[in-house]
Structure formats: structure tokens, C-alpha cells
Image: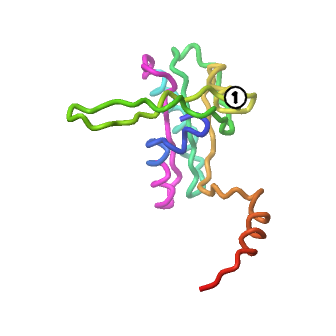
């Protein structure tokens, strides 16, 4: 659940539901293809919860937490980060189900395109746990005024 993967994440979606209910919510994920170090994730999750619990987070806070799949001794710290970004996913993969119906699978995720210092990608690559505060508002404010001006020019004739 790094970068813009949060838009597709069931883990983050579950945390969003907590947010809609007015609770602070944490979305924990291990980073890797075949996870080997769940024990690392368990220890880190426990430490984060113990630290945050007495310092109640504001209602509707969502934290996206990514834990590198490495032994606990290799964890270099915990960093507050921003979301990075990926290049688009690989091309669609065409397949068939046992009944002969055509299926399309989204290809593997693209490589990171914004993985610089301060991003979740960077933190995890450095063997740090990434903690990214998320908000629900995905409005693209930079285009708001220009878009409004364009829409206002539409001649609505009903």
C-alpha cells in the first residue's frame, strides 16, 4: 500500500470505513511479495499502537503504515512520510476462465516514479517503517478555478 496504491487497497478501504464512523484508524501492511517476517510486523504494530493509544489521534484520522519485510533487527526506524507515486501498471493480461470466458488481469504494478526522500517508497527502501497520514478529500484544487470557468461557459439549454 505504497504511494497511489492506497486508491486500490482493501486495507486502506477498511480504515476509511473507520474514519466514516468517526474513529481514528490504522492501516498496517507488510511490504513484499511473499512475506517472511510477520513477527517484525507484529512487534512494530504493537509498538505504534502502544505509543499512539494514550495520545488519542483526532477522530477521522487515517494512518497508512507500511512495514518492510525484514528481520526486526534490520528496521532502521519509523518515519512520517508522504505518499509517493508509481508509473502506470504493466499492460493488461488476457486470459480465459475454465468456461472459456475472456478475463483481463491488471498487470504487475509499475515502478515507483516518485520515490524520493520523504516518501513512503523511500522510507521502506531504507528499511524504515513508513507512517503516512491520509485524508479523504481527493479534490484537485489546482484545477478547480480553471475548470469552474470552463464549465460556466457551457450554454445550458433545457
> Which of 45 and 84 lies nearest the eye of the viewer?
84
Total labels: the figure holds 1
Q: Quadrant of residue 144?
A: bottom right
Callout 1 environment at 10 Å: few (<14), some (14 to 19), or many (20+)? many
Residue shown at the point (56%, 48%) measured from the top left: 62
Residue 124 is situated, as x and y percent measured from the top left of the image, at 62, 24
Q: Secondary structure at mark 1?
A: loop
Chain part drawn in magenta? 15-39
> Left or right: where does residue 23 sit relative to residue 149?
left
> Left or right: where does residue 8 sit relative to residue 81?
left
Eyeballing the image, is 153 above or below 72?
below
> Which of 53 and 75 lies nearest the eye of the viewer?
75
Residue shown at the point (50%, 52%) measured from the top left: 16
Residue 138 is situated, as x and y percent measured from the top left of the image, at 63, 55
* Residue that numbered label 1 is attached to: 115
> Which of 34 and 147 lies nearest the eye of the viewer?
147
Residue 101 is situated, as x and y percent measured from the top left of the image, at 27, 38
Q: Residue extending furthest bottom?
A: 158
Q: Quadrant of the C terminus?
A: bottom right
Q: Quadrant of residue 123?
A: top right
Colouring style: rainbow
> Left or right: where does residue 91 sit relative to residue 112?
left
> Left or right: where does residue 116 sit relative to residue 121?
right
Tell me, yes or no, whether the highlighted magenta stretch contains residue 7: no
Eyeballing the image, is 145 above or below 106?
below
Residue shown at the point (78%, 65%) measured from the top left: 145
Residue shown at the point (75%, 74%) measured from the top left: 153
> Which of 93 and 43 lies nearest the eye of the viewer?
93
Q: Residue extending furthest left?
A: 99
Residue 83 is situated, as x and y percent measured from the top left of the image, at 65, 38
Eyeballing the image, is 156 above or below 41?
below
Amino acid at each position: 500500500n505504497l504511494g497511489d496504491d492506497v486508491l486500490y487497497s482493501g486495507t486502506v478501504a477498511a480504515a476509511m470505513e473507520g474514519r466514516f464512523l468517526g474513529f481514528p484508524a490504522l492501516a498496517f501492511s507488510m511490504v513484499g511479495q511473499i512475506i517472511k517476517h510477520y513477527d517484525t510486523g507484529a512487534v512494530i504494530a504493537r509498538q505504534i499502537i502502544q505509543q499512539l493509544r494514550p495520545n488519542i489521534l483526532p477522530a477521522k484520522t487515517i494512518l497508512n503504515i507500511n512495514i518492510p519485510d525484514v528481520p526486526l533487527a534490520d528496521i532502521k526506524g519509523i518515519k512520517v512520510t508522504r505518499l509517493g507515486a508509481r508509473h502506470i501498471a504493466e499492460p493488461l493480461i488476457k486470459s480465459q476462465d475454465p468456461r472459456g470466458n475472456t478475463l483481463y488481469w491488471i498487470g504487475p504494478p509499475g515502478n515507483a516514479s516518485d520515490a524520493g526522500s520523504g516518501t513512503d517508497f523511500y522510507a521502506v527502501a531504507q528499511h524504515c517503517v513508513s507512517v503516512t497520514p491520509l485524508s479523504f478529500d481527493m479534490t484537485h484544487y489546482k484545477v478547480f478555478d480553471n475548470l469552474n470557468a470552463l464549465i460556466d461557459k457551457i450554454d445550458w439549454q433545457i
